[in-house]
C-alpha cells in the first residue's frame, strides 16, 4: 500500500471511530444514564424494586452494554485494522454500514422497551440488525488479520476470543428476542434468561476485553510489569467456566469461579504491584494509575457481593449491587480511565481538553458507585429504610460523572488535532501581543 493510500486509510478510520465514539456517548448519556437515574428515582420513591416495568430496566441495560460499550468496542476494533500488517485497504463501506445497522438496532431495542409500540416486530428486528452489524465487523476483522506466522500475543488472543463470544452473545440475544416476540406477553424477557444473558455479555465479552486491552496498554501508560500470559488466559477461561455454570443454574460454583478469575487477572496484570517503568502521563491526570488500580477493587467487590447474593439475596439488592459494582465500578471506571487516554489519539491525534475534568469524572463516578453499592442491599432487602434516601444521591453523582466525561471527550473531538494546536498557539500569542 502506498503512503498516500495509508494516509487516506488512516483518515477514514479516524472519522469512523469518531462516529462510533459519538454515538456510544449518546447511548451512555440519554438511554443509559439518564434513563437509569429516572428508574432509580422512581424505585426509591416507591420503596419497591419492582416499581418499574422490567422492559424499562432491560432497555437501560441494553443501552449501556451494547449502545455505549459495544459501540466503543466496534469503533476501536475497526480503527485497529489500519494498524495491522495488511495490504488491504480500509473496509470503509462495510465499516459505515455496520455503524448504521448497529446504531439503528440499539436505538430500536431501547425505544421498543420504553414505548412498547409494535414490539413483536421491532424487538426481533433490533436483534437482527445488531447481529448483522457485528457480522460485518467480524468478517472485516477476519479478512484483515496479519499472516506473519508469529503466534499472537496473549492480549490479542484474549480480545480475539472475546470477539467470538460477542458474536455468540448477539446470536443468543437475537434468538431470545425472536422467541419473546413469538411467545411472550410483553417486550420484557423472563428474569432468568435475561440475567443469564447479562452474565454472558459482561463476563464473556466486556471483562475479558478490558483485560486484553489492559495487558496491552497498562505496561505502557502506568509503567506496570509485562503481564503473565498464562495467568491472564487462565483467568479468562475461569470466567468462561463461570458463565457456563450460570447457564446451568450452578450459581454457587459460578460465583467462586468469577472470584478466582478476578484474583488471577489482578495477579497476571500486576495491577497492584509497584511500577517498573515511569508511567506515561502526558495529557492525562497524574491519578491515572491509581484509578486503574481502584477499578480492580470494584471487580473484587462485585465478586464478593455475588457470593453474598447466592446466600442471602431475597429481593435483588445484593445481585443489583454486585452488577453495579461490575458494570459501573469496573467497566465504566476503566473506560473513564483508559478511554480518556486513548480515545483522543484514535480520533485524529487530539489532546484531552481537561485533565481536571478527567479527575472529577472518575472521582464522582466512584463516589456514586460506592453509595449505590453500599446502600442498595440495605434498601432493597429492607434492612435499613433510610437507605432509600441515599440511592438518589448516588444516581445524581454518577450522572454528573458521565456528563463530565462526555463533555471532556466532546470538546476534545471539536478541537484541532495536536499538530495543528502547536501551530495555532504561536499565532494566538502574537495576536495577543
Image (tube, helix red, strand yellow):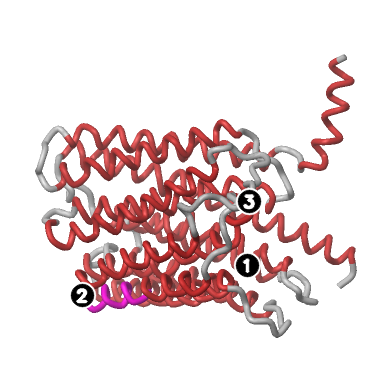
How far across and down, in percent of the image, does residue 216 sit? Answer: 60, 62
Give the residues in magenta.
Answer: 240-249
Label 3: how many Cα within 10 Å (few below 14, some 14–19, many 20+): few
Comparing 157 with 428, the one in front is 157
- Magenta-colored stretch includes residue 248: yes
Pick out the residue farthest to the top.
433
In the image, residue 173 above or below residue 333: below
Q: Secondary structure at mark 2?
A: loop
| Residue 316 image offset from top left, x and y in percent | 18, 54
Number of other residues with Cα within 10 Å of mark 2, as a class: few under 14, some 14 to 19, many 20 or more: few
In this picture, residue 425 sits left or right of residue 151: right
Determine which residue is flagged by label 3.
Answer: 277
Residue 416 seen: yes
Query: Which residue position is annotated with label 2?
Result: 250
**Residue 120 to residue 23: above or below:** below
In what quadrant of the picture does the C terminus appear?
Answer: top right
**Are there few (<14), some (14-19), or many (20+) residues within 10 Å of tag 1?**
some
Residue under numbered circle 1? 97
CB atoms at circles 3 and 2 under 8 Å apart?
no
Mark 1 residue element: helix
Residue 3 is drawn in which quadrant?
A: bottom right
Q: Secondary structure at mark 3?
A: loop
Amino acid at each position: 500500500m502506498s503512503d498516500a493510500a495509508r494516509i487516506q486509510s488512516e483518515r477514514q478510520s479516524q472519522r469512523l471511530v469518531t462516529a462510533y465514539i459519538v454515538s456510544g456517548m449518546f447511548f451512555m448519556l440519554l438511554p443509559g444514564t439518564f434513563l437509569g437515574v429516572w428508574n432509580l428515582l422512581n424505585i426509591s420513591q416507591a420503596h419497591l424494586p419492582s416499581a418499574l416495568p422490567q422492559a424499562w430496566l432491560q432497555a437501560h441495560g441494553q443501552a449501556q452494554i451494547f449502545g455505549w460499550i459495544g459501540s466503543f468496542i466496534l469503533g476501536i476494533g475497526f480503527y485497529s485494522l489500519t494498524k495491522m500488517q495488511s495490504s488491504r485497504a480500509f473496509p470503509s463501506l462495510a465499516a459505515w454500514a455496520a455503524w448504521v445497522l448497529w446504531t439503528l438496532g440499539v436505538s430500536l431495542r431501547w425505544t421498543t422497551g420504553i414505548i412498547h409500540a409494535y414490539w413483536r416486530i421491532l424487538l426481533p428486528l433490533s436483534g437482527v440488525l445488531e447481529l448483522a452489524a457485528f457480522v460485518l465487523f467480524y468478517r472485516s476483522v477476519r479478512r484483515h488479520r496479519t499472516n506473519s506466522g508469529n503466534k499472537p500475543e496473549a492480549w490479542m488472543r484474549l480480545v480475539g476470543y472475546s470477539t467470538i463470544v460477542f458474536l455468540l452473545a448477539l446470536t443468543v440475544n437475537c434468538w431470545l428476542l425472536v422467541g419473546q416476540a413469538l411467545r411472550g406477553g410483553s417486550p420484557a424477557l423472563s428474569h432468568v434468561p435475561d440475567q443469564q444473558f447479562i452474565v454472558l455479555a459482561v463476563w464473556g465479552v466486556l471483562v475479558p476485553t478490558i483485560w486484553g486491552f489492559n495487558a496491552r496498554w497498562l505496561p505502557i501508560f502506568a509503567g506496570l510489569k509485562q503481564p503473565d500470559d498464562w495467568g491472564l488466559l487462565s483467568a479468562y477461561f475461569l470466567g468462561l467456566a463461570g458463565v457456563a455454570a450460570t447457564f446451568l443454574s450452578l450459581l454457587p460454583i459460578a460465583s467462586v469461579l468469577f472470584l478466582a478469575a478476578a484474583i488471577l487477572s489482578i495477579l497476571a496484570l500486576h495491577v497492584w504491584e509497584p511500577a517498573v517503568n515511569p508511567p506515561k502521563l502526558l495529557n492525562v491526570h497524574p491519578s491515572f494509575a491509581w484509578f486503574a488500580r481502584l477499578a480492580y477493587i470494584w471487580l473484587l467487590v462485585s465478586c464478593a457481593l455475588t457470593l453474598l447474593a447466592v446466600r442471602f439475596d431475597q429481593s435483588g439488592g445484593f445481585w443489583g449491587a454486585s452488577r453495579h459494582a461490575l458494570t459501573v465500578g469496573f467497566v465504566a471506571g476503566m473506560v473513564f480511565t483508559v478511554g480518556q487516554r486513548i480515545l483522543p489519539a484514535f480520533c485524529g491525534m487530539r489532546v484531552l481538553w481537561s485533565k481536571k475534568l478527567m479527575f472529577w469524572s472518575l472521582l464522582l463516578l466512584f463516589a456514586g458507585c460506592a453509595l449505590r453499592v453500599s446502600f442498595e442491599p440495605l434498601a432493597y432487602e429492607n434492612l435499613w429504610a433510610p437507605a432509600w434516601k441515599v440511592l438518589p444521591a448516588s444516581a445524581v453523582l454518577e450522572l454528573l460523572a458521565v456528563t463530565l466525561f462526555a463533555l471532556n471527550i466532546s470538546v476534545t473531538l471539536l478541537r484541532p488535532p495536536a499538530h495543528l494546536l502547536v501551530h495555532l498557539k504561536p499565532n494566538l500569542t502574537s495576536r495577543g501581543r
